[in-house]
Amino acid sequence: MDEATTTALVGRGLSKTYGGEQALAAVDLEIEGGRVHGVIGRNGAGKSTLVKLLTGRERPDAGEVIVNGSAMSFRSVRDGADAGIVAVPQELVTPAAMSVREVITLGAEPRAAGFVRRRAERQVVSAVLRELDADYIDIDAEVASLPLSWQRIVLVAQFVHREAQVIFLDEPTAAMNAEDAERVNHLVRRLRERGRAIVYISHRFSEVEQICDVVTVLRDGRKVGTLSAEEINEDTLVGSVMGEDAAEILGRIKVDAEARRAKFGEGDVPPLQIEGVTVGTVRDFDLTVRPGEIVGLAGLPGSGVEDVFRCLSGERRPTVGAARVGKRTITDPASALRAGVAFLPGSRGEATLAEEPVLENLALASLSHCASHGFMSTDRIRSFADPVIARLGLRPVAERRMNELSGGNQQRVLVGSRILSKPQYLVLEDPTVGVDVAARGDLHGLIADLAAEGMGVVVGSSDPQELVDICDSVIVLREGRGHRTLSGATATEFAVVEAMATTRGERPAAGSRN
Amino acid sequence: MATQTVDKSAPGDSAHTPISRGPREWALALVRSRLFFGGVLLAALVAFFAIKLPGTFLASSNLKSVLEQQMTLVVLALGVTVVLMIGEFDLSFAATMALAGAVAVLMMTDHGWSALTAGALAVVLGLVVGSINGVVVAYGRAPAFIATLAAGSALTGIEQLLTSNKTIAEGIPIGYLDFTLVPHLGLPLSAWTGLLLVVVVAVVLAFTTYGRKVRATGLNATATALAGISVGKVRVSAFAALGALAGLAGVIVTSQAGSYFPGSGAGLLLPPYSAVFLGAAIVGRGRFSPLASVYGLAFIALLERGLTMLDEPAALIQLIEGAVLLSAVLLARREKAAG
């Protein structure tokens, strides 16, 4: 196919203003078939606006979208899709109770006289999955029962079935472990081989480096550079996106670990403890976190790491044993907070009142402190939350609504709301998921500061490197048991990944067939 | 939840709105505000009927009678608002109301209870029934729609068993009827009670930590639970509040009628919902609040009264009310889409 070099989609001088603020300013972009085009930038740099304009979700204030040489005027996502341009959203929106087959052909079923032609449908779906090198997916399985990466592949298959030529992938590997991420990235390479144009938006620069043929860098709504294949490496990517030096923060965490242990190890605050707990798929698990300590929890989905977090949050009661701080046992979320254990789930939506102002979100976990005789006022919340607002640099956004904030700021607000409840222990399931590098550095710095003040922190992450970077020790779960504890020199990304890897080979590796 | 909309002025990811405002901005903000819009709409409605019905529509006796007639709905709508605010639904409150009214009347006629104790019993009965609904929904994890549908059916069955489905009027003390009849400072006690409840419920929901918990539970129950709030208790309390208010409504209905009569609850299940949804759509930006509900009630009540006084047929009135509610909801959805 000579499609490999054709220009599939061009954006010229694209501009968009929201409420007086320039979200995108005269951005030019050329997307070619058979190539993976990376788009990187901090949250709020204009990435999502760019996607919206190019896919027809919103109309540009100025500039044009050109497909196959002719200028288009998309009025809706539908128009974009008709021209072969589609976006796979970061949050998966599939009708979860439908089968893979039904989802892939949804709205474009092979039919005769209004009836779905079942046999033709099966053939078409199998062919699409085979084309994507993903025929290990059972086409009759319910989509909700599949791993996250498979669900994303199903969604892409839906677009391929409708003959999409340009596919935007927004954070396609967010919240995925290495194995799942690789499966998705294999799909991306496969799409490239098949001549599709892929626009790959990601904060994971190691993946961008591996997979992208060309990278566009956005900053404050402007295009600040285009990197060719030779120029793409993690350092230039990080450098082009952020100014702050993440390495410095990480260095500080490591240096502090000894001092923290000496200072808080034998204090009055009892440790956060799990002893011989059986919860969900987890058997006989132990965990001890002392004040000032940062402990990481790692494990593949299904290893039980989610269950340990649910046990610490109080959402899930163990069948044997319990999480406790001294004499206080955690039986439900309210008792966790009373025991001084504050929890943030990995999915931000689970902890956010999206349509409410930042202040309301900050106050939620400590309402009684923001009231006198049960009566609240905005002033009272503001004065109560002010130290945390100042500390987390939230003053510019304090009056805004939560859903207007970038992912990084939302996460800061949520951490702030937990700090305000004055916990002894902070449990963060995946604090930097979908957060840009700079905000990620900020959050790491904040975690280090809190630990230095004597707070015990439990951190999870889908990125093993992150755990190795910020934790004093990392506990790796495998098949429902605490498999290994890594600390000091033994805690390397490789060691964590190796400890996580399951020995049972029942899950086919991407591309093992065909 | 579906009707809770985003403010249409919500800007994009990086936009921000200036905080400082001059008099002109304030005036503009006022004109743009939904309260202003709602006020103009209501004023236009009143003006229309005042011109069509000179001297009678705006007569204080007419307005007073509207107010007194609406008290049952005011009390019910307040409770419905609370349950909708936590993101749940209740289909049993009309049956609770009818049962509570029946029990109060029976205690007075067959057991010689005083008006006050019988009325108090009705409220307590409502509270208990509502709490049970709440426990079933919050801790039994039953879908509220089905659980309260079942509860309503069962409660109506009990009511019919107790009353043999016959009107009971003999032997009700006069004091019971006075509650909705004898004016104090211009209005009967029932009306003052209803107005006081509006103020109390509005203040509690707007300014207390309890109100905050109610709203947060409706917006995101998981986030609320993770913030250490007992979402289950909040849910039970909301259903209990609606139950107690339904008990009071039962007293008002039987007191106004001077009797217990079968089927009193049948016509009172959906009107409170209409009023609450209408109010939320017109003045609440799609969000439920006690005052928005009262606005919705006032709007429907005045519309109905005006059309009745103009001798419009009941069928047409029904049709117009349906059209008004539908347009209001569509308007609110459009705003959301525009945001």
Image: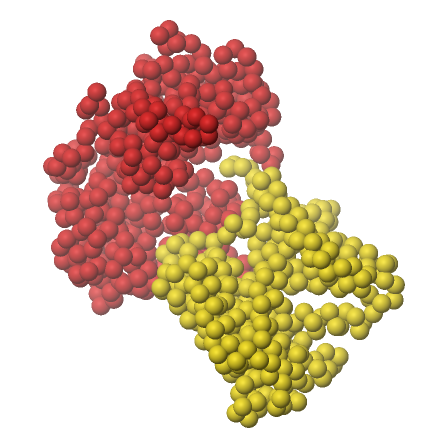
Chain colours: A red, B yellow
Judge from the rendering whether residue B65 lies leftward or rightward of residue A31; answer left or right: right
Q: Nearer the viewer, residue A155 or A326?
A: A155
The residue depicted at 27 percent of the width and 53 percent of the height is A310
The residue depicted at 61 percent of the width and 42 percent of the height is B334
User: In the figure, A419 relative to A184: above or below?
Assistant: below
Q: Is residue A371 visible?
A: no
User: In the figure, A402 relative to A113: above or below?
Assistant: below
Judge from the rendering whether residue A114 lies leftward or rightward of residue A441; answer left or right: right
Percent from the top left, x then y, of residue A142?
A: 31, 39
Judge from the rendering whether residue B105 lies leftward or rightward of residue A260; answer left or right: right
Q: Quadrant of the N terminus of chain A?
A: top left
Percent from the top left, x then y, of residue A424?
A: 29, 58
Q: Nearer the viewer, residue A373 or B325?
A: B325
Percent from the top left, x then y, of residue A306?
A: 25, 48
Q: Nearer the viewer, residue A247 or B268?
A: B268
Percent from the top left, x then y, of residue A454?
A: 27, 55
The residue depicted at 36 percent of the width and 39 percent of the height is A98
Q: Quadrant of the C terminus of chain A?
A: top left
Q: Residue furthest top?
A: A2
Q: Is residue A108 visible?
A: yes
The residue depicted at 25 percent of the width and 60 percent of the height is A317
